[in-house]
Amino acid sequence: MNLVIVESPSKASTIEKILGEDYKVMSSVGHIRDLAISGKGGLGVDVENDFKPSYSKIRGKAKIIKELKKVAAEADIVYLATDPDREGEAISWHIFDCLELSEDKTVRVVFNEITKTAILNGIKNSRSIDMGLVSSQETRRILDRIIGFKLSNLLQRKIGSKSAGRVQSVALKLLVDLEKEIIKFVPEEYWELKADFQGIIAELEKYKGKKIEIKTAEEMDVVLNALTTNYSISDIVRKVRKRNSLPPFITSTLQQASSNKFNYGAKKTMIVAQKLYEGIQIGKESVGLITYMRTDSTRMSDEFISGAKELIIREYGKDYYKGYFSKKGKNSQDAHEAIRPTNAMRTPESIKNYLKVDEYKVYKLIYDRAVASTMADAKFDDTKVEIINGDYLFIIEGKKLKFDGYTKVYDYDLTKDKLLPTYSVNQVLALDKLLPEQKFTKPKSRFTEAKLIKKLEEVGVGRPSTYAQTMDTLKARNYVKIEEKKFYPSEQGVLTIEKLDQYFNSIVNVNYTAKMEEDLDKISAGEEESVKIIGDFYYQFIPLVDQAKEKMESIPPKKVGRNCPECESDLVLRNGRYGEFVACSNYPECKFIEKDEKLKPVTLGVKCPKCDKGEIVERVATRGRSKGNKFYACNNFPKCKNILNGKPIKEICPECGELLVEVKEGIICNNKKECKYQK
């Protein structure tokens, strides 16, 4: 028997079905160890001994580790098949070290997609653990721990901010710096002039051969007074313009496109993509539909390109196929392929019935983009009509799609044709009216989640695996608020960056953080030593922390204008793990916390069918992914942990006697696993 260890239970299930009875596939459920919180400052590293890390088992993983160790001891070969990136390599090493596996019978397996061919090739080409990647991940984790513990604790005590981080704080700084730029912005007046020729609009572009700029109403009056009624066409320029297909998705571009097209946040996009990668039940088999979704490479396999070619020629004709050539991006690690379908022949429409709505949307987006990237350019007939009136030049632009090319498959950004009448040089045009318009310059637009991810990628801050988490942290820490899909930094967010700028500007900035990413890549490649990188950072950072401890002014929490009912001290606003709350200012002597009325359970008058003692109440979740959502449970918690599948309606199921509950789909039996009754 051979043992394969992966991180995800659903991934384990898919792979076990593919490999068959000679293999047992088990899941570590993510990391099994993390840096301990022992040692100097609780950092989990020995600062005086080359920053040697100390690891401890993650709470709740003891049972999993015990089971893995037992099965591994009986296995002929142990295949460590965690994700094909730096984080996955580190998880494999931790499993190897923690389970005390033998080097003789343990190998590392990497595959970019969960298909039979890819998995068998991965096993055939197994290797040893890449300690360069492990060292790089370990270095990143140590750096993040040092920053997180030292800087977060400082900010919590001094100004009430919840956390700071290597990438998180730079992302917040981009938002705050932009917001300050917007606040300082002073609009400037300018004017535009358009001319209406029987519904065709021309724009004034030049005066005496130079681009014209009209700043005031007075300047516009000069132009209007100089124009005559004589408008004639001086030239017509026609040319064919090509529009290239876009490359297949990488992590950041998938998150951006999903946000723009479906309004999905980065976190949701990655959750859906993870499911598509790990496997979907298609008929009788579980199939990985896309390649690994954390990547910064636009490479695609020859096998996929060949399949796409066959599909395109069959469906659209030879003229629609172009081929595909990828280029390595500036900050790309190029570790593995782009995000693409595992099979070009598995069209979105052919498997739509097996997918949830969001899974279908994301799969179709990925499929269309990957196939289209191999297709011919779209071609447009562009027409530019130049109209003169004395020394003034007006322009009319038109376009017509000549060959649709890749847009046959992927055209989420298509602009419509602008067709023009048949014009000729020297033709005189009859003016209907002039359309002067006053305008004002506008400040830069605030970042949407998609644009912030794009900016972080451009400046080399963060990596594919960090973008979604960074967006999530900014929201969870109440450093930002979202209005019309745009980030607005909160007062606390602005204050946090102002203090970081004042005391940590040499470290919390784009250039330093981008260089740190480069150094981590160099450690992976064996070009830099981990100890040197950590040491250089630590001995620059700690003096800044000590200075800030001494000089940074503490800001007391805001008073809410009421007194504590227990000790008469002022009630103040405090920041907690799950948001703001009202508490006594006399903490820790007085530990009064004001309960939110919205979070108090609402009695529904329904007896709990499980314990027959408590009542079912309506509660509001205060943490996790369900925070803010209502749920229905027994008020006899923790003695009774009954949670219903929906809101009880005080009626009994006529088939099994259980409670009936209300859900989105209607009225169903709460015992939905065994009873299929639906009203």
Image: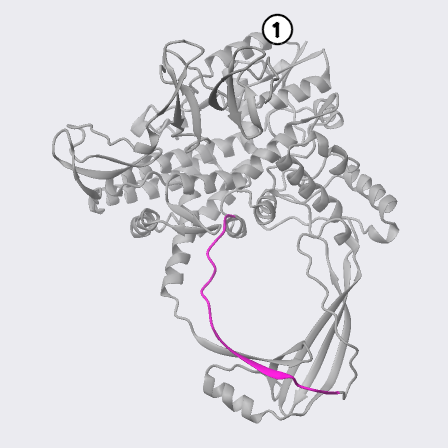
Residue furthest left as drawn:
568
Q: Is residue 213 above or below residue 649?
A: below
Q: Is residue 469 above or below residue 230?
A: above
Q: Position of residue 193 (x, y in %)?
A: 57, 80
Q: Position of residue 37 (x, y in %)?
A: 35, 25
Q: Position of residue 286 (x, y in %)?
A: 70, 23
Judging depth in this view, the residue of 633 and 404 nearest the camera is 633
Q: Please give the name of the residue rendered at 72% of the width and 71% of the height, measured from the top-left corner.
A: 398
Q: Quadrant of residue 590?
A: top left
In the image, taking residue 387 as reference, residue 177 lies left or right, namely left
Where the N terminus falls, by quadrant? top right
Give, as a three-letter code, the residue at label 1. Glu
Where the C terminus falls, by quadrant? top right
Q: Please give the name of the residue rendered at 61% of the width and 44% of the height, measured from the top-left corner.
A: 254
Q: Is residue 561 above or below residue 207?
A: above
What scheme was used to colour the molecule? one colour
Q: Mark 1 highlights which residue?
A: 74
Tell me if mark 1 has few (under 14), some (14-19) or many (20+) residues whose alpha carbon lies within 10 angstroms of its own: few
Indicate whether residue 7 is drawn in magenta.
Answer: no
In the image, taking residue 215 as reference, residue 319 lies left or right, namely right
Q: Quadrant of residue 3?
A: top right
Q: Secondary structure at mark 1?
A: helix
Indicate whether residue 440 is drawn in magenta.
Answer: yes
Q: Please give the name of the residue rendered at 52% of the width and 19% of the height, measured from the top-left corner.
A: 660
Count all numbered tags in the image, as a single digit: 1
In the image, taking residue 481 as reference, residue 208 lies left or right, namely right
Magenta extent: 428-449
- Say if residue 154 shows up in the picture: yes
- Say if residue 528 shows up in the picture: no
Q: Quadrant of residue 231?
A: bottom right
Q: Position of residue 297 (x, y in %)?
A: 64, 43
